[in-house]
Image: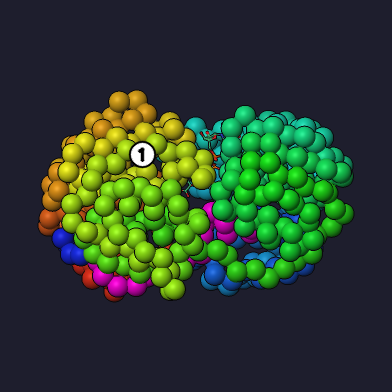
Amino acid sequence: MYKIVIEGGRPLVGEVTLSGAKNAALPILASTLLTNGVTVLTNVPDLSDVRTMGRLLQLMGAEVTGRGTIKVDSRGIHAFEAPYELVKTMRASVLVLGPMVARFGRARVSLPGGCAIGTRPIDLHLDGLKAMGAQVDLRQGYVEARCKRLHGADLVLRQPTVTGTENLMMAACLAKGRTTIENAAREPEVEELARVLNKMGAVVRGAGTSYIVIEGVDDLHPVEHAVIPDRIEGGTFMVAAVVTGGDILVTNALPEHCDAMIQKLRASGADIQAETGGLRVRGTGAIAPLDISTAPFPGFPTDMQAQFMVLATQAVGPSVITETIFENRFMHVSELCRMGADIEVRGKTAIVHGEPGGLQGATVMATDLRASASLILAGLVAKGTTEVLRVYHLDRGYEAIEKKLTPLGAAIWRVRADGP
Ligand code: EPZ
């Protein structure tokens, strides 16, 4: 296994290019099951989660080749099961459920189970498929779904679910008739998936809003598509620029995907300018305290909560950060406190008593993907040496982050470590 070692205290200066968005690539890879041919995806991030999705499609009989540019030949699909061994490592595997039932009339997908940040139920996915006519049973930890042909339905989601919206949107594309999804997730990755589905011949309208209408068609054809940049990776580098007092041009960031983050960074005193090449983000000295509450897009993204908590540790005065999406997404707090942060958690809210320059390097443990990113950020700003263990969490969502940080002036290395 590996750990990442960081010598903190250096301002990050230079230019960084974002990789393709993990949370766009995963549903798009699953959507290839809806077609009968060879799909070519470019700008796909080379991440462990993407490789896991590729292995899942191969298990089902697809031919998946390439890294960065991935080809999926879905003509040989002969198995309709997503096994526990794979699903337990990546809950986004559930995204094959909708396409499988829609195209093949059957699916057996392991229940994803919980993960570090929460119980992560999929009841909204299953209720939607049932409303579209699928027989759905839970047996021995698996979802077994069957339906000769799904029919359109008017779906109302109890709360916006990103992968739930994506699963149901994909299923509805091949259903007979019209499906509407009310209270749909509005994330850019949902909109990107709809863009790909429409290129495949689907009729999806309203993606990116909370009301999506899908007219079912009989079949979809493969496409070529370039994946959008990763807004969460982008936000992570923006925080890195501000928290180290640096100056980073994030060359391919899409401002319309980052509005809530940009607003909070500006409120903290950062200077952010849209330039022809992307977004330039500069730390300008004193960091003002933050008041953040995570929410579904276009609200402040829960996937950036841990990273902004590091910024809050450098603010002059107390910040308030409330996590409204997941029930257990404060596991980075104890590790940040071991680095000298002063954070108290009261239920869904963390009060961060900032102290500029108050973090000291330490050996810390990553617990989940975005928590690990926050520990890297903390190491970049802390005095002395920080070692982040269990970086396999980080590699799920960041493509060789140390290789992107080094040219910006970071003193950061990936070294072998014993143990997990
Ligand atoms: C997606 O997860 C992302 N993953 C997550 O990113 C992200 O944190 C999350 O959306 C919220 O933005 C992918 O896109 C692959 P949800 P998802 O369904 O779809 C509840 C990362 O770091 N819910 O939007 O699984 C659920 O418990 C990952 O890249 C139900 O109750 O999240 C949660 O409280 C972490 N029943 C809320 O909805 C359901 O059937 C939002 O979850 C589904 C969800």
Which span of residues is magenta-colored?
12-29
* Residue at x 69% of width, y 48% of height: 206
Asked whether residue 136 appears in the rendered view, the answer is yes
Percent coordinates x, y for residue 410 in the rendering: 23, 67
**In the displayed structure image, the side of residue 322 where residue 412 appears, left or right:** left
Q: How far across and how far down the image is residue 123, in percent?
A: 63, 31
Name the image quarter holding residue 323. Answer: top left
Q: Position of residue 230 (x, y in %)?
A: 48, 60
Which corner quadrant of the image does residue 293 belong to? top left
Query: Vertically, is 350 above or below 400?
Result: above
From the viewer's perspective, tell me whether residue 235 is left or right of residue 108. left
In this orientation, which residue lies closer to the viewer: 193 or 372?
193
Label 1: few (<14), some (14–19) or many (≥20) C-alpha neighbours in 10 Å: many
Residue 16 inside the magenta-drawn segment: yes
> Which amino acid type is shown beneath numbered disc 1?
Ile
Frontmost residue, 273 versus 72: 273
| Magenta stretch holds residue 82 | no
Q: Which residue is mark 1?
A: 292
Q: Position of residue 22 (x, y in %)?
A: 51, 57
| Front residue of 312 and 19 | 312
Q: Residue at x 63, y 45 (%)?
A: 209
